[in-house]
């Protein structure tokens, strides 16, 4: 039987052997008027230029895209994607992915991968979930079967998947939870983090990032930061924001929370995919972000452009023979008209979702490229202002 | 505004200016033991090696595939696809496609295109349809609105779409219709064909093919053939077979009907996509065939292989890390495992439909390539026997 050759992605990359840690951060340049910063995250699957937008492949596939089209997104390419521990644990099962040789091989992705811990999903998607000191008991969204995720279980699953960056198992509390609840939850998240560090079997090949919690209470964020930074992990996320709160409260946390993290480690805000939220995060010194938004919008016929979103299902596009976005040079905009994509969307054709996914992923990857350029040229504030004026949402 | 560059497909081809007719057939070799024949159809959008399998793009898209992946299918590439007049008339409307510059530009396909007449669809899909001498009145499958397709209307729509090969408007009668009905229907189809010839506005750029009817009655097939061959059209289809009859009756018609058509014109059987039906058609001298089967099967998790169909949703594939078909070198088989595709199919991931569509289209395009090679080497009978023994369906 012919063996499978796992290497069609754009930047095939053998595991580096010259690195002592699986993930390190190199600061290249700081913007002089904001906290925005330009850097590189070195991983065993290649370098990642930051700030970076990471496309999401929940089920080991960035929906409706070939991996090489993800790898070629933007002008510089995409070298990191995110995948979801909760979903892959339930199906196909981490044992299957491990037998396949790990997630990179299973899904044919030669760049870096980050897996989340499942903490967010078991708290938000799991029905009848119950949080105890041990972990979170929940029921499968597929068949209702009972499961338990603990820090140990999450790390066991993430070790099996084999992503370059793995995340600590945390509780992402509701944005309207009270002080007492958040204090207890934050303290438990730190205890869980210590158990994650203990349970982690592959620190030479997989970097475990800690997650700061503490809700919208500055003293609790400080407590959380002190505790997790003391563990000297290779990177940190700011959790519990962009969970339904107002934008002011989101920005409010960013303004003090990012400073609580070490400068020599990458900083990550999970689940943000709208340009305004991304720009606010970058302005406050965040390096990494991800969101399902671009591919989800695509499957609903929506295109992201510099001038806001376009609903290609609208009747006015039926005889509009220009490209989705005249300022875009992605595959979809080079070869297909709004009229054609309107037709595909109206007919629920898969190719419509394919074209719009490729366009939207390109849009966000290019936004991150433009952000990096602006920081390099010390004009991030101007870029942010101009972009948002034009974007108008 | 940046203009759209319509040329990503594999074999960009400018309209030829050295041809007096839009479509001509060149016979290259005849098999000595069967009626199988190897030829070339010359079109303004390039040459088509026959026997040929034509992928179907009903809605101006071969479902779940980029046009360049269709163009690159097989080892020699694919240079002709089919699209449906009935569907494009209802949505987006032939006026829109015409404004886009024709179907080739609209869907970004630089090879040849064949459009059917809508005759089959208005008879089979149209609810409350009524057949008169004038044409067929039917209701839209989208919104129930009333429409009428006549020979003139079908040709008007096909002239607007601008395919290289267009089909006469015929009635495809049910396989169990009686002699009297078929006799009347066949005679009407000939009268309709004459109206199609009259109505055809672009004979210099679009070749109109006639369709033989006559059901399963040899005398009516002879009558039909005499009448349509007298019109000296650039190609002919055998209609009214593969419509639900037994395989014996299908082969029975082929055995005498193909001989009634001129040797210097291409011969086409519509809507066949299973290897056994294709091989029977080729054995009897047919050059062209098409079917939605490969992409439809793909969307249901089915792969076509030399050893029959594989339902990738089956549990036994969950930890099978070999390729779909060890004998296949398509993109899907080179880079992805059965276990991965099983996972995608179980999760209803679009990428599963993408990979299986590409595999199945490659399978049928390569089958046609192997058929051509067998005829060239004068071993079609042996090839057919070996293939079907292995295929086992």
Image (cartoon, coloured by chain):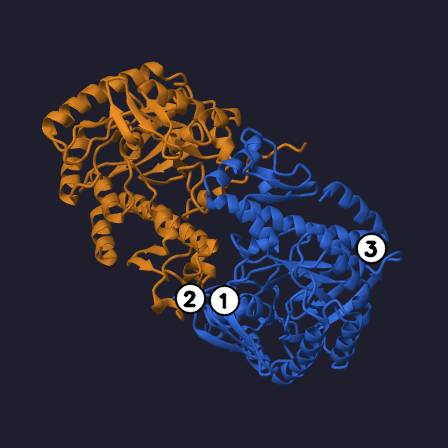
Chain colours: A blue, B orange
**In the figure, residue A179 lies in which quadrant?**
bottom right
Mark 3 or mark 1: which comes first in sequence? 1
**In the figure, residue A21 lies in which quadrant?**
bottom right
Quadrant location, the C terminus of chain B: bottom left
**Rounded to the nearest whole Å, what is the CA distance between mark 2 and mark 3?**
44 Å
Q: Chain of mark 2?
A: B
Are there few (<14), some (14-19), or many (20+) residues within 10 Å of tag 2? many
Q: Chain of mark 1?
A: A
Question: Which residue appears at 19% of the width and 34% of the height?
Answer: B174
Question: Which residue appears at 74% of the width and 78% of the height?
Answer: A228
Percent position of residue B248, x then y? 13, 43
According to the picture, the residue beneath numbered tag 3 turns out to be A376
Left or right: B250 with respect to B136? left
Percent position of residue B54, x then y? 36, 39
Q: Is residue B306 above or below residue B381?
A: below
* Residue placed furthest toward the top: B198
Are there few (<14), some (14-19), or many (20+) residues within 10 Å of tag 3? some
Q: In the drawing, what numbered circle is on residue B63?
A: none
Pointer 3 with pointer 1, Cβ within 8 A: no
Percent position of residue A296, x then y? 56, 52
Quadrant location, the N terminus of chain B: top right
Are there few (<14), some (14-19), or many (20+) residues within 10 Å of tag 1? many
Tell me the SS state at disc 3.
Answer: helix
According to the picture, the residue beneath numbered tag 2 turns out to be B339
Tell me the SS state at disc 2.
Answer: helix
Pointer 1 with pointer 2, Cβ within 8 A: yes
According to the picture, the residue beneath numbered tag 1 turns out to be A106
* Badge 3 and badge 1 both on one subunit: yes
Tell me the SS state at disc 1.
Answer: helix
Percent position of residue B157, x then y? 40, 23
* Residue placed furthest toward the right: A32
Left or right: B181 with respect to B341? left
């Amino acid at each position: 039987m012919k063996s499978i050759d796992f290497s069609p992605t754009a930047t095939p990359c053998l595991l580096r052997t010259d690195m002592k840690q699986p993930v390190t951060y190199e600061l290249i340049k700081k913007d002089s008027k904001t906290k925005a910063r330009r850097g590189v995250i070195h991983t065993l699957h290649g370098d990642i230029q930051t700030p970076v937008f990471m496309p999401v492949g929940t089920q080991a596939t960035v929906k409706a895209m070939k991996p090489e089209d993800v790898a070629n997104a933007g002008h510089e390419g995409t070298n990191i994607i995110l995948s979801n521990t909760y979903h892959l644990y339930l199906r196909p099962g981490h044992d299957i992915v491990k037998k396949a040789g790990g997630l990179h091989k299973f899904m044919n992705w030669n760049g870096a991968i980050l897996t989340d811990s499942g903490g967010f999903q078991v708290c938000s998607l799991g029905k009848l979930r119950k949080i105890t000191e041990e972990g979170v008991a929940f029921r499968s969204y597929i068949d209702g079967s009972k499961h338990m995720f603990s820090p140990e279980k999450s790390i066991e699953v993430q070790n099996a998947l084999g992503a370059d960056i793995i995340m600590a198992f945390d509780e992402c509390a509701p944005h309207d939870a009270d002080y007492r609840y958040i204090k207890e939850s934050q303290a438990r998240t730190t205890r869980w983090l210590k158990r994650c560090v203990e349970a982690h079997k592959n620190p030479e090949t997989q970097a475990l990032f800690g997650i700061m919690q503490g809700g919208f209470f500055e003293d609790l964020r400080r407590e959380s930061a002190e505790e997790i930074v003391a563990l000297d992990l290779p990177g940190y996320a700011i959790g519990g924001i962009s969970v339904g709160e107002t934008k002011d409260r989101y920005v409010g946390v960013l303004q003090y929370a990012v400073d609580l993290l070490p400068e020599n480690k990458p900083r990550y805000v999970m689940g943000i995919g709208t340009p305004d939220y991304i720009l606010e995060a970058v302005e406050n010194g965040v390096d990494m972000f991800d969101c399902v938004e671009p591919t989800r919008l695509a499957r609903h016929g929506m295109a992201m452009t510099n001038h806001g979103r376009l609903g290609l299902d609208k009747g006015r596009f039926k005889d509009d023979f220009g490209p989705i976005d005249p300022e875009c040079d992605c595959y979809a905009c080079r070869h297909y008209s709004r009229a054609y994509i309107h037709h595909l969307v109206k007919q629920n054709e898969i190719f419509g979702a394919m074209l719009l996914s490729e366009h939207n992923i390109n849009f966000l990857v290019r936004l991150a490229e433009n952000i990096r350029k602006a920081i390099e040229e010390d004009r991030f504030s101007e870029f942010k202002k101009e972009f948002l004026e034009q974007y108008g949402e």
